[in-house]
Image (cartoon, grey):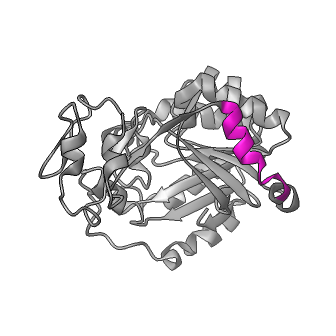
Amino acid sequence: MIRISNIEKFATHDGPGIRTTVFLKGCFLHCPWCANPETWKSEPVLMHDAKKCVECKTCMHVCEHGAISFPFQWDMDKCIYCKKCENYCLQDAISFAGKDMEINEVIKEVLKDKDYFDQSNGGITISGGEPFMQLDAFLELIKQCKNNGLHVAVETTGNYCLDTLKEALPYIDLFLMDLKHLDAQKLKDITGGNLNLILNNFKYLAQHCPNKVIVRMPVIPRFNDDICEDVIRFCANLKLSEVNLLPFHTMGKSKWNQLNKEFMYDKDKMMDRNDLTPYIDVGKQLGVYVKIGG
């Protein structure tokens, strides 16, 4: 059994070709710009769309455990995930992010598009959240993927011990490795990440299978938008050949609202891709292919 947040078909930005992206629940980090904050917790979470809600309070009345109150609040500790609130909401204002699936169910769903994968050199991308957080289920999933001839890409923070990485390595064709900062304290303070763990994994992959790695850096205002060249140089020193600079965007803002969380970048504008194009030449000088976007 594996807990997923979503399955997105015909993805073209998380690895080569046409792909199906499976988003797993649970993450070691808590990045305040995250586009998928509903994946942070391992447990299912309720999402409430205030724009659809007419405050009829049906959800509150059908909840037998007092988990919902108005103005709308959801008490996770009282919720038993019966989903009556979701089922009775005529406005579709309530949904739960997170459901358990048998691994063979996930494989069956992914294989529906195998013809597209074969024609485009695509495959499955496992994202999150952090896939390695559900380690046993994740390992079983990627093993079954390889048994079914699927190209496996994993989008990961790298925030786990090296032995964990080594266990999964034989079943992964491509690592989309996030590198958010090179300052350990700043990374910890803002995201909760452990830079030592992350860099150990980067160095191991660079030494043993550099062709399996694409480095991805979300470029975030006031956090790391001044260190793009440093990250490119870091990758050049490790002989890692590709860096994707991901311009800051606010497309996840509505999810923060639905989770009743404050989005701290609410007043920031989406970053213009052209602001990052000078780093393409920086990469050329250092022998690193720099791509703007994923």
Task: Judge from the rendering whether residue 119 lies leftward or rightward of residue 8; answer left or right.
Answer: right
Q: Is residue 174 visible?
A: no
From this viewpoint, which residue is outermost toward the left? Answer: 71
Quarter of the image where the C terminus is located: bottom right
Question: In the image shown, does 281 or 99 lie closer to the viewer?
Answer: 99
Quarter of the image where the N terminus is located: top right
Q: Residue at x 12, y 52 (%)?
A: 71
Instruction: Give residue 96's position: percent from left, percent from top.
Output: 39, 45
Instruction: Give residue 293's position: percent from left, percent from top.
Output: 58, 66
Q: Is residue 50 visible?
A: yes
Per the image, is 114 magenta?
A: yes
**Vertical order, 30 against 140 (above or below):** below
Task: Judge from the rendering whether residue 55 lies leftward or rightward of residue 216; answer left or right.
Answer: left
Instruction: Give residue 68's position: percent from left, percent from top.
Output: 20, 42
Question: In the image shown, does 12 or 265 lie closer to the viewer?
Answer: 12
Q: Residue at x 43, y 72 (%)?
A: 271
Which SS does the magenta portion mostly show?
Answer: helix
Q: Residue at x 24, y 47 (%)?
A: 59
Q: Which contiguous range is marked in magenta?
A: 103-115
Question: In the image shown, does 86 or 37 lie closer to the viewer?
Answer: 86
Instruction: Give residue 3's position: percent from left, percent from top.
Output: 53, 34
Question: In the image shown, does 46 or 18 lie closer to the viewer?
Answer: 46
Label count reads 0
Quadrant in the picture for residue 80: top left
